[in-house]
């Protein structure tokens, strides 16, 4: 299984991915607040603990702790401050990925499953919040929201081609703070492509 999280709002000089092979690092990342902070850093390119606090709803002290934990495992790094007083952080890479292979172990598999579940839970929370509060949005934003589900027959190479095409399309809209057009707003994008696995016969008959 290949699982990754990618946000293309970082500078092009940033590494594309961090390869996660240490179960301890994967477990350290598998925390809702840390995932939210990492997403913010990728989106805004840098942030301090106060800005992370406003985005996550956690206290600045809590965000400072989570930032230091992320830094300990190489997910974020400190930025040099012009006056030496402000501590700002940036993501160390544009995304991360973790997958099985020759080095797979029960600990790595368990940690990878935990992180995958945390990422999926976060995506579901964003969707649930939208569904519950969609009426608060302007009609044009409600009408522009996309919920797409489809099935296709492809080879493994074609599936990777779909992934690359989606990544290239998203990259077209990668913009820093000064580049975002008037009227734009933060939009959560989720792309999932997994082989269809038939349900056991008992589950099919009960559903």
Image: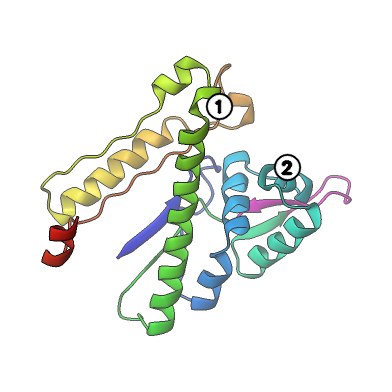
Label 2 environment density (alpha carbons within 10 Å; few <14, some 14–19, many ≥20): few
Residue drawn where x is 40% and y is 20% of the image: 143
Q: Kindly give the residue lying farthest to the front in the view shown.
A: 206
Q: Is residue 33 magenta?
A: no
Q: Position of residue 62 (x, y in %)?
A: 75, 59
Q: Position of residue 18 (x, y in %)?
A: 48, 62
Mark 1: secondary structure: loop
Instruction: Say which quarter of the image contains residue 11.
Output: top right
Residue drawn where x is 45% and y is 48% of the image: 123
In the image, the segment drawn in magenta is 79-91
Q: Could you tell whether 79 is left or right of 184 in the image?
A: right
Q: Kindly identify which residue carries mark 2.
A: 54
Q: Position of residue 201 (x, y in %)?
A: 11, 65
Residue 19 visible in rendering:
no
Numbered circle sitting on residue 59: none
Q: Could you tell whether 151 is left or right of 180 in the image?
A: left
Q: Earlier in the sequence, mark 1 or mark 2?
A: 2
Residue drawn where x is 78% and y is 46% of the image: 50
- Magenta portion: prevailing SS class: loop
Numbered circle sitting on residue 185: 1
Residue 196 visible in rendering:
yes
């Amino acid at each position: 299984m290949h699982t990754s999280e990618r946000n293309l709002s970082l500078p092009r000089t940033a590494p594309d991915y961090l390869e996660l092979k240490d179960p301890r690092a994967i477990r350290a990342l598998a925390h809702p607040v840390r995932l939210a902070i990492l997403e913010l850093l990728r989106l805004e390119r840098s942030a301090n603990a106060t800005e992370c606090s406003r985005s996550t709803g956690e206290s600045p002290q809590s965000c400072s702790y989570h930032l230091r934990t992320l830094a300990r495992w190489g997910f974020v790094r400190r930025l040099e401050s012009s006056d030496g007083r402000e501590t700002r952080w940036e993501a160390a890479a544009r995304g991360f990925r973790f997958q099985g292979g020759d080095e797979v172990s029960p600990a790595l598999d368990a940690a990878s499953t935990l992180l995958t579940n945390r990422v999926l839970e976060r995506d579901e929370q964003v969707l649930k919040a939208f569904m519950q509060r969609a009426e608060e949005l302007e009609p044009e934003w409600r009408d522009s929201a996309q919920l797409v589900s489809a099935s296709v027959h492809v080879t493994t190479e074609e599936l990777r081609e779909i992934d690359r095409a989606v990544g290239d399309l998203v990259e077209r809209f990668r913009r820093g703070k000064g580049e975002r057009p008037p009227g734009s707003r933060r939009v959560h994008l989720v792309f999932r492509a997994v082989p269809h696995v038939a349900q056991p016969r008992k589950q099919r008959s009960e559903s």
